[in-house]
Every structure is written in structure tokens, then in C-alpha cells.
Image: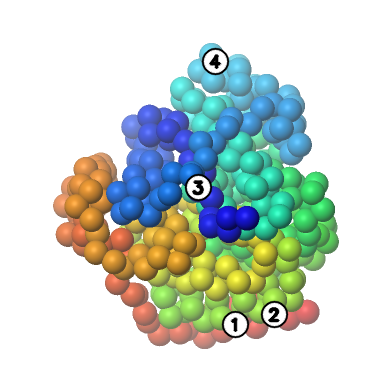
């Protein structure tokens, strides 16, 4: 059996946008895929074009009435006010747009497919996944559906347990934690910025017993993250002894991201991948947040390299540099981007002092 990782993607993300003024107006998945190909890191035999999840498949987690409303909203590009409010559609960062059902359903199709690919072991990378705020019956936090929950349910349905869900997005993985609260087959570990939307996941929150939250302070640096990885994430995963790890690898903790105040380099994301790869016979790596097109694309392409045993610090090819120079971003940072955003995929390390609060968080999550 070929043990090389699978990469799942789709061209839907290249042409789809939440709207010109939305944080998800930027190209993310398409940039990562273009960079992976431009670097020569993809055997096309290991690439799968994502299917679109059917309403029946989505019903494994989501309420059928909500799925029907999401489809209706895509067709009509509107909903009556009462249904719009009930389902969180067309408001609170979850706009009406052309592919508002098909785009998230494609991410879910990838995660459902990944659960099947992992039945006998292996690694799957689906950078479009990681929509961890989605609720059973409503959209939340740019997430119309919850593909990590569907992936985990697909794994559990195959008797694959326990599951360790590790989430390093700058925002708390609230939708996944709440989906499996009290289910002793699923453990959730979330490292996120404390006091940031959705204003959940304090370190005291154990979500029915199976959740561990590290609500870190602003300006988290690589040195502090390395300590969290070594002293908290790895020991917790060792305790779980998982049959599968699902890693939500949101890139919004990288310093240049506009929607968080953490100070990581993408080296921290790669370090998590390297640490978790040998810890379970199955690994699903999802995307997540990330609102700077350069930092997201460079991060997720580099993660794919690590999954394949490739050094992501190798020189950028002319084709990859062309991809990076072709990006645009309306925010101030995008008007005059630094040269290394065009010529490297791996950030410079961002070390710093380890604050007492970090050690306190580690001790808290390790306590019985």
C-alpha cells in the first residue's frame, strides 16, 4: 500500500469569495495548492478533487432543516428575516454569496472522504477544512458547516477511536468541542488567544471532561508555543493514545494575520505537524483560519512539505515566486509586502521570553 499522504482540494475556492470586503475575500486554498505544485511537491496521483457532500451526508451532524435553508439561501441569495436570524445566514460575518452551500459542502465532502481514506491508516491533508465554529443548526464565525465534526463522526462510524482533535487556530474550536462534549471517544485540545471571539474556551473549561483548552495571552511567541507543544500537547496526546489525530492547522496565529494578536511564525505550525505525525497511525490535517493570503498559502504549502518529508526551506522556484508575486491584498500590509513574502515559504523564527502565564496554563491543563 502506498503510504504517502493524500492531498484533497478543489477549484471552487479559486473563484469563490465571501464578498470583496470580507476577510475571506482572499485566495487561500488555491494559493496553497498553486505553491505546492509550483514547488514540484505534488505527485498528481496523490491528489483528489473533493466531492460535494450531499444533504444526506451532512445530516450525519447537521439538522436537515438547516441544510435545506442553506441550499435555499444559495439559490435565492436571501432568506426571510426570521429564518436568516434563526440560522445565522446573511448576518454576523456569514454573508449570502454565490457558493454559500456548495463551498462549505465541498470542504465537508473532503473531510468525509478523508475519514474513509484513513480507515486503514495514513495521512490526509485537506487545507479547505477546519470550519470549527459551525453549529448543528446554524452558521457561526464564517463557518456554515462543520467539516471536522463530520470527519470525526466518519471515523467513529468505522470504529476508529479514540480521536485526538488538536486545534491551533487563533480562535477557540468551540463548535467541535461542543459537538463531542461528554463523548469519551473524542478528546479536544485547543490552543487559542484568550479573550478573542468567540469568547469561549477558558482554560478552566473542560467541556464535559474530554476538552483541554489553553487560552494564551496576546503576543504568543515561538518559544512559548514550543513549550506548550512539548509540555502540554504532546503529553496530552500521549495520554489519549489516539487511533487518529485530527489537526486543525489554522494560520491566523501567524504574526502578520489581521484577525488575531499572536506572534508566531509558521515554524510553529510545522513543529506541531512533525511532533504529531508519529503519535498515531492516522493523521488528518485541516486548514482553518488565516486572513493574509501570503501567510496562509506559505504556511499550508509548507505543512504539505513536512507531511511528505520534504524540507520546506529549500529555495523557492521561479514558478512559486510568480504565484506569490501575483497575490494582492487590500489591507495596508498588502500594499507594500516585504520581499521575503515572495522569496521564502518558511518564516524567520520568532522567539521570545516565556511568561509565567504560559507555565500556569500548562500546569492547569495537565492537572487531573
Q: Indicate which label's residue lies in the foreground, 1 or 3.
A: 3
Asked which secondary structure carries label 3, the reply is helix
- Is residue 142 visible to us here? no
Residue holding disc 3: 46
Image coordinates of residue 21 in percent, x first then y, are 35, 35
For marks 2 and 1, the one nearer the N-term is 1
| Tag 2 secondary structure | helix
x, y percent for residue 280? 67, 67
The colour mode here is rainbow
Of the residues tagged 2 and 3, which is closer to the observer? Answer: 3
Q: Using the image as rendered, state which of residue 314 and residue 93 is in the foreground.
A: 314
Disc 2 vs disc 1: Cβ atoms closer than 8 Å? yes
* Distance between the alpha carbons at the discs numbered 4 and 1: 49 Å
> Could you tell which of marks 3 and 4 lies nearer the N-terminus?
3
Which residue is rendered at x = 54% and y = 20% of the image? 74
Q: Dot 4, crowdedness within 10 Å: few (<14), some or many (≥20)?
A: some
Mark 4 highlights which residue? Answer: 75
For label 4, the SS is helix
Q: Earlier in the sequence, mark 1 or mark 3?
A: 3
In the image, which disc is placed on residue 145? none
Q: Are marks 4 and 1 in contact (CB under 8 Å)?
A: no
State which quarter of the image contains the N terminus: bottom right
**Residue at 34% from the left image edge and 32% from the top image edge:** 20
Q: Label 3 vs label 4: CA separation?
A: 34 Å
* Residue ID at (49%, 78%): 226
Amino acid at each position: 500500500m502506498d503510504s504517502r499522504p493524500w492531498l484533497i482540494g478543489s477549484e471552487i475556492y479559486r473563484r469563490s469569495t465571501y464578498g470583496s470586503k470580507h476577510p475571506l475575500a482572499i485566495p487561500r486554498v488555491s494559493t496553497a495548492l498553486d505553491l505546492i505544485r509550483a514547488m514540484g511537491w505534488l505527485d498528481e496521483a496523490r491528489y483528489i478533487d473533493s466531492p460535494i457532500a450531499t444533504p444526506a451526508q451532512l445530516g450525519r451532524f447537521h439538522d436537515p432543516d438547516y441544510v435545506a435553508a442553506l441550499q435555499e439561501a444559495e439559490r435565492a441569495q436571501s432568506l426571510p428575516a426570521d429564518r436568516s436570524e434563526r440560522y445565522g445566514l446573511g448576518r454576523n460575518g456569514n454573508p449570502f454569496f454565490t457558493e454559500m452551500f456548495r463551498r462549505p459542502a465541498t470542504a465537508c465532502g473532503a473531510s468525509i472522504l478523508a475519514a474513509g481514506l484513513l480507515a486503514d491508516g495514513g495521512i490526509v491533508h485537506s487545507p479547505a477544512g477546519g470550519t470549527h465554529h459551525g453549529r448543528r443548526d446554524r452558521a457561526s464565525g464564517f463557518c456554515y458547516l462543520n467539516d471536522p465534526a463530520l470527519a470525526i463522526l466518519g471515523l467513529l462510524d468505522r470504529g476508529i477511536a479514540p480521536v485526538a482533535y488538536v486545534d491551533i487556530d487563533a480562535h477557540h474550536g468551540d463548535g467541535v468541542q461542543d459537538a463531542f462534549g461528554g463523548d469519551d471517544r473524542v478528546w479536544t485540545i485547543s490552543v487559542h488567544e484568550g479573550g478573542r471571539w468567540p469568547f469561549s474556551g477558558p482554560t478552566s473549561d473542560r467541556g464535559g471532561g474530554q476538552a483541554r483548552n489553553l487560552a494564551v495571552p496576546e503576543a504568543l511567541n515561538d518559544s512559548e508555543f514550543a513549550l506548550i507543544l512539548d509540555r502540554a500537547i504532546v503529553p496530552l496526546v500521549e495520554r489519549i493514545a489516539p487511533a487518529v489525530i485530527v489537526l486543525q492547522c489554522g494560520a491566523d496565529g501567524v504574526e502578520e494575520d489581521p484577525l488575531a494578536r499572536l506572534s508566531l511564525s509558521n515554524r510553529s505550525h510545522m513543529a506541531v505537524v512533525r511532533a504529531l505525525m508519529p503519535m498515531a497511525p492516522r493523521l488528518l490535517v485541516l486548514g482553518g483560519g488565516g486572513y493574509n493570503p501570503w501567510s496562509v498559502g506559505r504556511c499550508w504549502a509548507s505543512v504539505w512539505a513536512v507531511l511528505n518529508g520534504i524540507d520546506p526551506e529549500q529555495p523557492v522556484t521561479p514558478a512559486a515566486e510568480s504565484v506569490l508575486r501575483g497575490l494582492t491584498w487590500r489591507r495596508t500590509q498588502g500594499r507594500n509586502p516585504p520581499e521575503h513574502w515572495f522569496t521564502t515559504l518558511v518564516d524567520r523564527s520568532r522567539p521570545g521570553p516565556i511568561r509565567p502565564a504560559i507555565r500556569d496554563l500548562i500546569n492547569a491543563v495537565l492537572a487531573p
